[in-house]
Amino acid sequence: MALNREYAAYVEDLLSPVGGVRVRPMFGGGGVFCGDLMFGLIADDMLYLKADDAFADDFAAEGMAAFTYEAKGRTMSLSYWQVPERIGDDQDELVAWAVRALKVARDAAAARPARKRKSAK
């Protein structure tokens, strides 16, 4: 399914207090970015936010599940969790959760070793 541009614009509007949030088309859905950092995704008109173990517990307590997809006959799970409907309906709370997801994404990026760039020959 292709990214629903109206829903993407709605998400950008809801998350505008975070600052610099943009949705980019990716793999039939959308990546939710702040600058070059992806902290959320959209699939089938549902918003998912990046979560570490502690934040994932909050999603699970709301009855939400991690984003999954099928690849090579296996179900793959990502560290992005579906936003509970009650939070999606409350901009202030959604922004607070998005800021937390952005921190998780920043921490994960900082923990990754720097990529070596190939030099031009």
Image (spheres, helix red, strand yellow):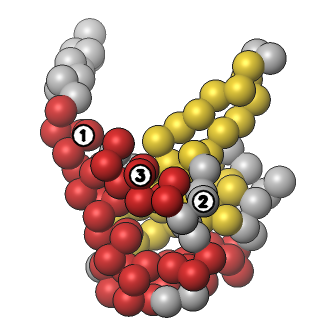
Judge left or right: residue 37 versus residue 8.
left
* Residue that badge 1 annotates: 109
Write down the quadrant of residue 119 in the picture.
Answer: top left
As measured in the structure, the alpha-carbon distance from the residue carrying label 2 to the one carrying label 3 is: 10 Å
Give residue 37's position: percent from left, percent from top: 33, 53
Q: Nearer the viewer, mark 1 or mark 3?
A: 3
Marks 2/3 in contact by CB < 8 Å: the verdict is no
The residue depicted at 57 percent of the width and 87 percent of the height is: 89
Observer-nearest of 21 and 105: 105
What secondary structure is marked by label 1? helix
* Residue that badge 3 annotates: 57
As measured in the structure, the alpha-carbon distance from the residue carrying label 1 to the one carrying label 3 is: 21 Å
Vertically, is 82 above or below 22?
A: above
Give residue 111's position: percent from left, percent from top: 18, 33
Counting residues from the start of the chain, the first of labels 1 and 2 encountered is 2
Single out the residue that lies furthest toward the front.
61
Q: Nearer the viewer, mark 1 or mark 2?
A: 2
* Residue that badge 2 annotates: 63
Single out the residue that lies furthest toward the top.
121
